[in-house]
Amino acid sequence: MVRNNIQEVLKAAKIKKLLSGEIGLALTFLAISVLFSFLSDYFFAQQNLLNITRQISINLIVAIGMTFVILTGEIDLSVGSVAALSGVSTAWVMMITNSITLGILAGLGIGLAIGLINGLLTVYGKIQSFIVTLAMLGIARGIALYWTSGRPISNLTEEFAIFGAGYLEKIPVSSIIAIVFFIFGFIILNKTKHGVYVLSTGANREAARLSAIPVNRYRILVFLVSGLLSAVGGIIITSRLLSAQPTVAEGMELNVIAAVVLGGASLSGGGGSVVGTLLGAMIIGVINNGMNLTGVSAFLQEIVKGLIILFAVLAKRNHD
């Protein structure tokens, strides 16, 4: 009798764990999709699904970088501004050199440089990453606006559009890029020692140091990853618009953090996965798209995204 009761308790606990984890997120995604399909006949239209896929791809790429940062117990609020500045630098270099390759390298270089600055100030400047990246949010956006005098850089070469608006068969190229980064992120975090080091750094920094893990190096590396992937996101946005706009990606950090936290990552570090981030990004993307289709006010949408972050953190705390 007692044994049966114990088995029932363990079974219930196992089911609860599954439903509160990645399976639960997948079921949530399906439920939300079904709900919006009833609210809008256009939701499952091919064109709309492609729009959702393209939008998710950009947020997912940047969210993967944010996942690395949050796993170490840090935060990066500058991702949207870095994306904008990287897009501006890419377009500017392309205009003066007529080279797509040099333009992309310039954009990626900007992302890496800002990531390095964020990491060095956080680790060696001993300033909280929240403060460092909040300051960088304003600095990077200000540089982009000053560089362009607040005006977009347009008339980019049509060949550049392949990254943001191109298709391989019927699959958006931006989605393929996102899948590639997702696979790399998954392999690094789950199949290499570097993933163990990142997770260990977030779980217990002092214990990681005693285990001979170069904690400071990995704390800087995750900001480099975040800066690089933010730049990739900015380049894809610029490619899609064939124009570098210094005001793009405003509020991107909210979408990205919401995706990572909703995916089960702990803001204190040491817990989370890129699979959870993928599912979180898919849920956020579907919610954004569904609210647009059903005519929900843009102001209310910001409230909804804020509530998603709040409830995700509460759910994570109660589960832990």
Image (cartoon, rainbow, N blue to C red):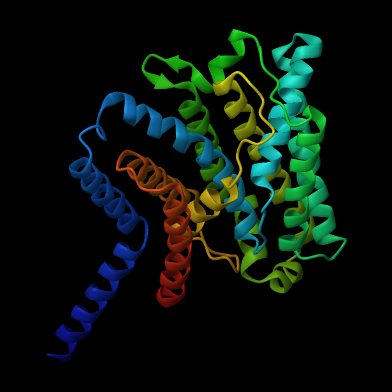
* Residue found 69% across the figure and 42% down from its top: 81
Q: Position of residue 23 (x, y in %)?
A: 31, 55
Please name whichever residue, 113 or 2, is drawn nearer the observer in this view of the structure: 113
Q: Is residue 79 above or below residue 262?
A: above
Q: Quadrant of the N terminus?
A: bottom left
Give left or right: position of 176 versus 92: left
Q: Is residue 169 above or below residue 106?
A: above
* Residue found 76% across the figure and 62% down from its top: 131
Q: Is residue 236 above or below residue 293?
A: above
Give left or right: position of 188 versus 89: left
Residue 152's image quarter?
top right
Q: Position of residue 138 (x, y in %)?
A: 75, 49
The tally of labels here is: 0
Residue 264 visible to the viewer: no
Q: Quadrant of the C terminus?
A: bottom left
Give left or right: position of 245 versus 12: right
Residue 179 visible to the viewer: yes
Q: Residue furthest left?
A: 1
Residue 245's image quarter?
top right
